[in-house]
Each structure stands twice: as C-alpha cells, then as structure tokens.
C-alpha cells in the first residue's frame, strides 16, 4: 500500500515538473519574436541567419520522436514540448524564407527539405528496429547528442560576456528560461530513470547556472540592456 502511494506521488511530481518544463520552454520558443517583428517591419532578413531555426527544428523533431510511446515509455511531455517547439521553428523558417533574398530562399528551402528527409530516415530506420530497447538506444543517442549540442551553443556567448565584461549579448529572461526548463527536465528525467533526458538537461542546468552567475556579476558594468538581434544566435 505504501509503495503504491509513493509511486503515485512520484508520478504526479514527475508530471508536474514535466508540465513546468513545457511552460518554461515557451519562453525560449517566443524569444525570437522581437527579431521577426523587425524582419516583418523592414521586409528584410538583413544580416540575420536562418540556420539556428533549421537546426532547432531538427533538434525538436528528433527529441519529439524519442518521447513518443513507439520509442520510449512515459515521456509524453517530452513529445508535447518538442512538438510545440517544432511548430514555432517551422513558422520562423517560413517567415525567414518569405522575407529573405532569392538566393537565400533556395538555400533555406533546401535545408528545410534536408531536415524533413533526415527526420524521415531516422523514423524509418528506428521503426525497422524490432527490439524496443535497441530502438530506444538508437533514437535516444541521437536525441541526447542533439540536446547536448543545443545546450552547448551558449558557450560562445558565455565567452563573449567574460571577454567584454558585459551582459548585453546575453538576455536575462532567455538565460532564466533555459535554466528553468533544463532544471525541470533534469528532474523529470531522473524521476523517469531516463539518462537520455537527465544527462543533457543536467549539462543545460549547469550552463544555465553559469549564465545567470555571469549576468549578476557583470550587469552593473554593462552599458546597456541586451539587444533583440542577439536572441537569434541562441534560438
């Protein structure tokens, strides 16, 4: 009886932190909105790059697939957050293609098709793996690698903050959202005994702490607030 109550409580807690992770992730998904307002207003993508959104789309798709019941158990909240993330990235890519130059349109369309092709291959190959554990290992390793590379992307910004002693290149709410999301899914992964979730999010949590520590250390010496275009490099 006690074990049953404990298991139920753990399940409720796991779902709670998973839902919290979904909410905090929303802050990351909407972070490029100011940049795209500028793009729409000026009818030009200027010097902005569309590559971060293409990469983020592939990342979300792989991790979304990992969270489905066909690949792993009890990870539906991983699927929901990455489904929403994939939808946001797709909208950003479409907007970027709409307002960019002709040569970049062709390139972005090619990259978008490449992402769809790669994801389709991953799904097709994983479905050919009959053993459930082997299938989870295959998709999990890909998802873990994608998440770690995503969480490692702020290292350039961290280095820039240290060099310039200014946080203008590191928006506070973006860093806070990343930290809270990583922490939530770190707890979620631990409660679900899933290293493919808690390992990359553990790394994300550590990097989030570093970013927040740097922010509070250098915010007094920064000459101005963070600028919107810098959000793009983190997307």
Image (cartoon, helix red, strand yellow):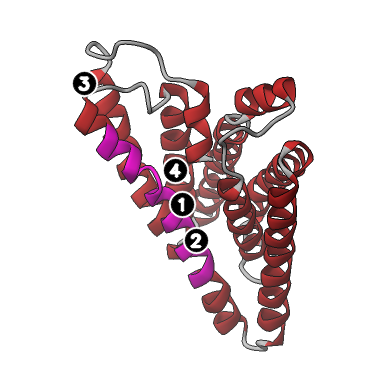
Of the two numbered discs 4 and 3 in the rendering, the one whose residue sits closer to the viewer: 3
Residue in the image at 26% along x and 19% along y: 216
Q: Is residue 218 above or below residue 170?
A: above
Mark 1 lies on residue: 150
Q: Is residue 87 above or below residue 196?
A: above
The circle on residue 146 is 2
Dot 4 crowding, Cα within 10 Å, few <14, some 14–19, many 20+: many
Quarter occupied by residue 48: top right
**Mark 2 falls on what kind of element?**
helix
Residue in the image at 49% along x and 49% along y: 188
Q: Main secondary structure of the magenta part?
A: helix
Of the two numbered discs 4 and 2 in the rendering, the one whose residue sits closer to the viewer: 2
**Mark 3 falls on what kind of element?**
helix
Dot 3 crowding, Cα within 10 Å, few <14, some 14–19, many 20+: some
Q: Are marks 2 and 1 in contact (CB under 8 Å)?
A: yes
The circle on residue 182 is 4
| Residue 5 located within the stretch drawn in magenta | no
Residue in the image at 67% along x and 54% along y: 79
Q: CA distance from mark 2 to mark 3?
A: 30 Å
Q: CA distance from mark 4 to mark 1?
A: 12 Å
| Residue 146 located within the stretch drawn in magenta | yes
Mark 3 lies on residue: 217
């Amino acid at each position: 009886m006690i074990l049953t109550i404990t298991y139920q409580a753990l399940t409720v807690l796991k779902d709670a932190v998973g839902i919290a992770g979904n909410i905090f992730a929303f802050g990351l998904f909407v972070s490029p909105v100011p940049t795209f307002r500028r793009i729409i207003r000026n009818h030009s993508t200027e010097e902005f790059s569309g590559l971060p959104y293409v990469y983020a789309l592939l990342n979300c798709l792989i991790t979304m697939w990992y969270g489905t019941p066909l690949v792993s158990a009890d990870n539906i909240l991983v699927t929901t957050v990455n489904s929403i993330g994939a939808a946001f990235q797709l909208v950003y890519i479409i907007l970027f293609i709409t307002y960019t130059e002709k040569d970049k349109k062709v390139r972005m369309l090619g990259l978008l098709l490449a992402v769809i092709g790669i994801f389709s291959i991953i799904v097709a190959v994983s479905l050919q793996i009959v053993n459930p554990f082997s299938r989870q290992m295959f998709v999990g390793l890909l998802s873990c690698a994608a998440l770690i590379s995503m969480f490692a992307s702020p290292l350039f910004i961290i280095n820039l903050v240290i060099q310039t002693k200014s946080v203008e290149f590191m928006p506070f709410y973006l860093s806070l959202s990343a930290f809270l999301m990583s922490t939530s899914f770190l707890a979620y992964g631990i409660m679900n005994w899933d290293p493919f979730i808690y390992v990359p999010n553990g790394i994300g949590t550590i990097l989030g702490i570093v970013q927040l520590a740097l922010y509070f250390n250098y915010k007094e010496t920064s000459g101005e607030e963070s600028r919107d275009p810098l959000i793009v490099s983190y997307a």
